[in-house]
């Protein structure tokens, strides 16, 4: 009798420790594209052709064409909290489970949001560049005057896990916290004193606006030219969620014209490309999508992806499914 081949997993990118060892320990056949760079479309189509599971990043487009090229595929494990790179309805229609990595990167991303809040408000990037260039000659009472943070109003757009974690940190700065969200977060309100308000009110009142909303059709360009014009001219915009929440060209114009004071960005509309003029603006603090980039958070993301894959291939319920109706259909 010939033993059946073990289920196959296609892993699209190099991963931080612990890597894919647990998949191999579970007896799975792992095809690991162990390269720190995005795969081409041809590599993706070839990689999923015989795969039972796919471990991918948010940079990879998982659409109907790719899913049709993977007739054995049972699970897509996305190395991210968001899933705007995946056509989830198409996966659901094909009986494929989609999983993500929520919760394990909450604190790391909230920390980085605060790094951007403080850095952009206090012009840290400009100061660092000035010192490194040799342009700083002496203490000056007029040098790089920034905006205060303590005691001001923080507006959070999207009060999920990460938005709530950002709000918790605001208590240490004695800030007034307001938030806009489709649904109230009663637990966050009780813990942080945050007040839910309409988005237009949030934009008008906030000294700092921090974005933590998911990206979908209705939220694309949520922060457009009109939204930017509604903000205070002294306001700071921070985005650690998804780049396309912001109309980047409109943001460049608003920063250049003084419509708002500054921006701190970790994500971009067409990353890694930047809208023309963004990199040249001194009133920006720009990071390369490192919101979850701590050793602890990234290791937890790897483990969660692998655990979700082994669970599905073993006939068990994954820990963090995005389309649990697929699992209900299987048990029916």
Image (cartoon, grey):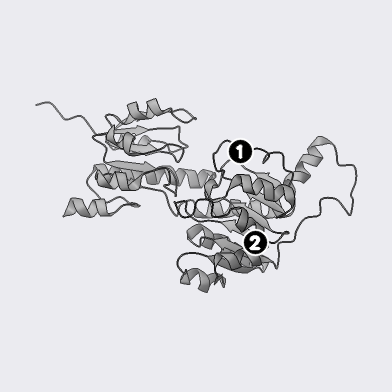
Is 204 in front, or is 317? 204
User: Can you tell which mark lies on residue 158?
Assistant: none
User: Can you tell which mark lies on residue 274?
Assistant: 1
Where 184 falls versus 75 (above or below)?
below
Cα–Cα span, label 2 and label 1: 24 Å
Residue at coordinates 12% horizontally, 26% vertically from top-left?
Answer: 2
Q: Is residue 191 left or right of residue 208?
A: left
**Residue at the far front in the pictured view:** 226
Residue at coordinates 51% horizontally, 60% vertically from top-left?
Answer: 158
**Element type at marker 1?**
loop
Where residue 98 appears, x then y in whole percent?
A: 33, 46
| Earlier sequence position, callout 2 versus callout 1 | 2
Q: Dividing the image into 4 quarters, which one contains the C terminus?
A: bottom left
Where residue 325 appears, x then y in whole percent?
A: 26, 54
Judging by the rendered image, the residue that carries numbered circle 2 is: 230
Q: Dividing the image into 4 quarters, which one contains the N terminus?
A: top left
**Element type at marker 2?**
helix
Q: Is residue 26 left or right of residue 211?
A: left
Is disc 2 in contact with disc 1, using a CB cutoff of under 8 Å?
A: no
Where residue 127 appears, x then y in whole percent?
A: 78, 45
């Amino acid at each position: 009798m010939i033993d059946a081949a073990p289920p196959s997993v296609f892993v699209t990118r190099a991963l931080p420790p612990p890597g894919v060892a647990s998949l191999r320990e579970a007896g799975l056949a792992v095809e690991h594209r162990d390269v720190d760079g995005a795969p081409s479309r041809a590599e993706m189509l070839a990689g999923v052709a015989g795969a039972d599971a796919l471990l991918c990043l948010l940079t990879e487009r998982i659409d109907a064409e790719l899913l049709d090229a993977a007739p054995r595929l049972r699970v897509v494990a996305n190395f991210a909290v968001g899933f705007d790179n995946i056509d989830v309805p198409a996966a659901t229609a094909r009986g494929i489970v989609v999983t993500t990595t929520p919760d394990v990167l909450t604190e790391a991303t909230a920390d980085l949001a605060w790094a951007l809040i403080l850095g952009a408000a206090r012009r840290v990037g400009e100061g660092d560049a000035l010192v490194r260039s040799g342009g700083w000659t002496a203490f000056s009472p007029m040098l790089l005057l920034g905006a205060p943070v303590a005691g001001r109003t923080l507006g959070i757009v999207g009060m999920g896990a990460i938005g709530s974690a950002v709000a918790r940190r605001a208590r240490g700065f004695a800030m007034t916290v307001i938030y806009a969200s489709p649904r109230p977060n009663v637990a966050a309100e009780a813990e942080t004193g945050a007040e839910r308000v309409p988005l237009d009110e949030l934009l008008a009142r906030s000294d700092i606006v921090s974005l933590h909303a998911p990206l979908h059709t209705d939220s694309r360009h949520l922060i457009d030219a009109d939204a930017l014009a509604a903000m205070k001219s002294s306001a700071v915009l921070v985005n650690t969620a998804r780049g396309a929440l912001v109309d980047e060209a409109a943001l460049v114009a608003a920063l250049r014209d003084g419509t708002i004071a500054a921006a701190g960005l970790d994500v971009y509309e067409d990353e890694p490309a930047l809208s023309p003029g963004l990199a040249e603006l001194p009133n920006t603090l720009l990071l390369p999508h490192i919101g979850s980039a701590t050793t602890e958070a990234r290791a937890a993301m790897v483990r969660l992806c692998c655990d979700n894959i082994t669970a599905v291939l073993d006939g068990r319920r994954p820990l963090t499914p995005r389309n649990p109706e697929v699992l209900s259909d299987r048990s029916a």
